[in-house]
Amino acid sequence: MDEATGKLLGLLDEHGGRLHRLLVKLTLRKDVAEDLLQDLFLRLSTSKGFLRSPNPERYLFRAAINLAFDWRKRDRRASATRELTDQDAAQRECPVEKLIRREELERILAAMDRLSEANRELITMRYINSLSYDELAEHLDSTPHCVRAQCSKAIVRLRKLIGLNTTSNQPQEVPHVEQRYT
């Protein structure tokens, strides 16, 4: 086993579950998340950039985020039009409510696709992957205060892209991606 494969296997053992959940949240499809996780492994096992990276964990997550958004660009079919099975309908909320939530999520993810890579990574890791500011600061080799400010600016950019009113004095929250979308 070469150095890249060994390093990658160690990271996937440690973070594989989190990576899979993140990919499911970004693609809204478990089957695609599994394929992307395999593709991620194959790409990084031959990547010279991964071996030279000073922060392989960050490289791994950034590559996963980029793969998911690349997939979203290639595959624009509306996942909300997928038929509900009887089991899905029994376990979940009203199909109309689900459709509305899914459309909102699609709108947010489409807007995130138009953000810079750095802003997209910040929003994904903070609001979709639910990392704390301290964890994110450690991940990005920064301070929690700096990360909080960067996240705030990224959210303002995202709100402008999706058309939310950012001039209001009342704080607005970006909806967290919840497990029910998977």
Image (spheres, grey):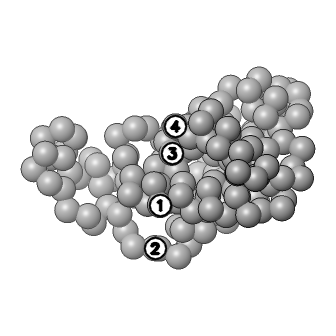
- Left or right of residue 54, residue 97 in this image: left
Residues packed near mark 4 inside 10 Å, few (<14), some (14 to 19) or many (20 plus): few
**Front: mark 3 or 2:** 3
Q: Is residue 122 visible?
A: no
In space, the residues marked 2 and 4 are separated at their CA atoms by: 26 Å
Residues packed near mark 1 inside 10 Å, few (<14), some (14 to 19) or many (20 plus): few
In space, the residues marked 3 and 1 are separated at their CA atoms by: 10 Å
In space, the residues marked 1 and 4 are separated at their CA atoms by: 14 Å
Labels 4 and 3 touching (C-beta < 8 A): yes
Whichever of labels 3 and 1 marks the residue nearer the N terminus, that label is 3
Which amino acid type corresponds to the residue marked 3 in the rendered image? His
* Residue at the spot of label 1: 35
On residue 20, the disc is: 3
- Left or right of residue 17, residue 152 in this image: right
* Residue at the spot of label 4: 17
* Residue at the spot of label 2: 76
Which amino acid type corresponds to the residue marked 4 in the rendered image? Gly
- Left or right of residue 101, residue 54 in this image: right
* Residue drawn at x 22%, y 40% as measured from the top left: 92
In space, the residues marked 4 and 3 are separated at their CA atoms by: 5 Å
Quarter location, residue 123:
top right
Whichever of labels 2 and 1 marks the residue nearer the N terminus, that label is 1
* Residue drawn at x 23%, y 52% as measured from the top left: 96
